[in-house]
Amino acid sequence: SYSVEFTIGDEYHHGTLPLKKAMDAVLESLKILREKKWKRATLYHSSSGTLLNPDGDFGGTRESYQELVDRADFIARFANAGEEREKTTASTLRPFKQTPQPDQAHERLKRILKSKRTQLPKGSRGIIVFDVTELFMLTDFSIESALYGDLVVTFSAPANPGGPVEEISASRDKNGFFGQTSRVSAVVIHKRVVESSTVTNGWRVYPTNRADADTIRLSLKELRRFGELDDRGHLAAENASSPEG
């Protein structure tokens, strides 16, 4: 009987407990809406608690519920469709942007990795294995930007207007994940691909490019135990001599 519009925070991923709890709250809300015959209602949900109220009516002073509303990172807005239907229509919302915005997938990946690094002990070989199977739009470019920093391309101005650009060079900014921690020696990116009845697993290893004295690097032999290095072998302990991206 209701359509639902979702606004969903970054922490709600497919198959995770936070998403399961949020969807349980949505299903329970649908039962309440049918019983009370509310026309419209909003569900505010986070790890701090859950609040369902008919739009514009908090059943008391708004201040008593303000913290739950402010902390909500999973919001569902219900609207009565006027008739019983076989399925509930749902859509996700993003703030409308007047101008195109740069992709922020690398920043989201950095935030997730930062929350994981605190679980690793200091002064030891820390390795994070991260499954990106369910993360859409996460490209190789985004992964490298998140780990090693933004790609900075510099070149000299042409000697003459319209002339060739010379001395092009590329380097990494120091805002990558590895540059901010000595606890992580490498990140292993795992991705599962299903084609027809065949399941393949890809494992790609990204060694740290941090060159500080307190960084513990892994050898080529150690890194290759976890997957493919591609062109990142120069960051292994026996080859690295400078902070390269």
Image (tube, grey):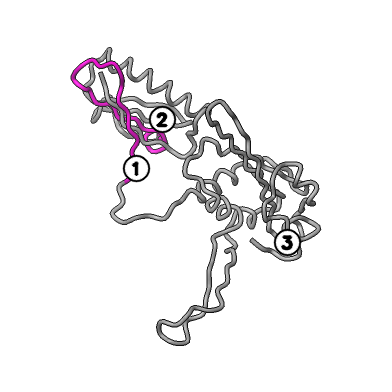
The reply to whether dot 3 and dot 1 touch (C-beta < 8 Å) is no
Q: Is residue 26 left or right of residue 206?
A: left
Q: Is residue 90 left or right of residue 125?
A: left
Q: Which segment did they paint magenta?
A: 68-95
Q: Which residue appears at 38% of the width and 19% of the height? A: 27
Q: Which residue appears at 69% of the width and 54% of the height? A: 208
| Picture quadrant where residue 203 is located | top right
In 3D space, how far apart are the residues under numbered discs 2 and 1 (Cα atoms)?
A: 17 Å
Q: Which residue appears at 32% of the width and 45% of the height? A: 95
Camera-nearest label, 3 or 1: 1
Quarter in which the N terminus is drawn? top left
From the image, tell me which residue sits under label 1.
94
In 3D space, how far apart are the residues under numbered discs 2 and 3 (Cα atoms)?
A: 42 Å
Count of labels in the image = 3
Dot 3: what SS? loop
**Residue 45 circle label:** 2
Q: Is residue 175 left or right of residue 85?
A: right
From the image, tell me which residue sits under label 3.
212
